[in-house]
Every structure is written in C-alpha cells, then in structure tokens.
Amino acid sequence: MSKKKNNSIHYSKKHIFPHTDFYFIDGKNHPEIPMHTHDFGEIVFVINGTGVHVTENGRYNIQRGDVFVLDGIQKHGYIKTKDLYLIDILYCHERFEQ
C-alpha cells in the first residue's frame, strides 16, 4: 500500500502479485475501508452481511448474492459494514492482454 500525493490510498500490484496473476481474499467480518484505488482488477462476491460500496459515482447498498467487478482505476471504499463477508478475486490486467 502506498499514499499518493493527495493522501489517497493506492494498493500496488507489486505488493499483491509477486509471483502470480491472481490473488484470493477470504474476507470474513470485512471492515470499513476508506476510499482507495489500485492498479489491478477485482471481482467481488458478497457471501453474507450488508454494507455500502462507495464510489465516485455514488453509494450502493450491497448484500448477500451481489457480485461486482472493479477495474481498479475507480476510487472506491466500504462503509456501514455489518457481518460483511466478501470473497475477492484480484487479477492483473496484463493477464487478459496476452
């Protein structure tokens, strides 16, 4: 994780993907996470609980059964999480450009 000039949070693929193109996160009791960006894609499965996914385009209530894809460029975060359980599949964009 690194901080950009404007104090926003940015997660870098060099810290997540040292030897692989995919990374899985089993996120039980997912906490609130401040707005951030990253240089990799993310597929999010909401397994249980509720929360609000915040983007620059709006706020979206999320709940069990929801699935969404993030390109990483868009700033986003999570608030009002309650028993939120997410499965995240993180992937390098370059994997799909070959």
Image: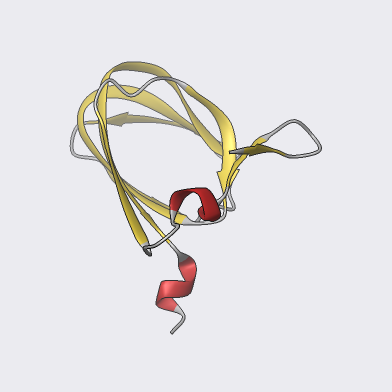
Q: Quadrant of residue 76?
A: top right
In the rendered view, tell whether residue 13 sits above or below residue 49.
Answer: below
At a point 28% along the width and 22% down the height, the residue shown is: 50
The residue closer to the viewer here, 62 or 14, is: 14
**How many numbered discs sit on the rendered protein?**
0
Q: Residue furthest right?
A: 5
> In the drawing, does residue 11 fall left or right of residue 28?
right
Q: Quadrant of the C terminus?
A: bottom left
> How far across and down, in percent of the image, does residue 72 sit?
53, 52
Q: Position of residue 9 (x, y in %)?
A: 63, 35
Q: Is residue 82 above or below residue 88?
A: above
From the top left corner, tell me how far across and down residue 17 is, in percent.
43, 56
Tell me which residue sits at (39%, 20%) in the image: 31
Residue 2 visible, this angle:
yes
Quarter holding the N terminus? Answer: top right
Residue under the image location 38 percent in, 64 percent down: 21
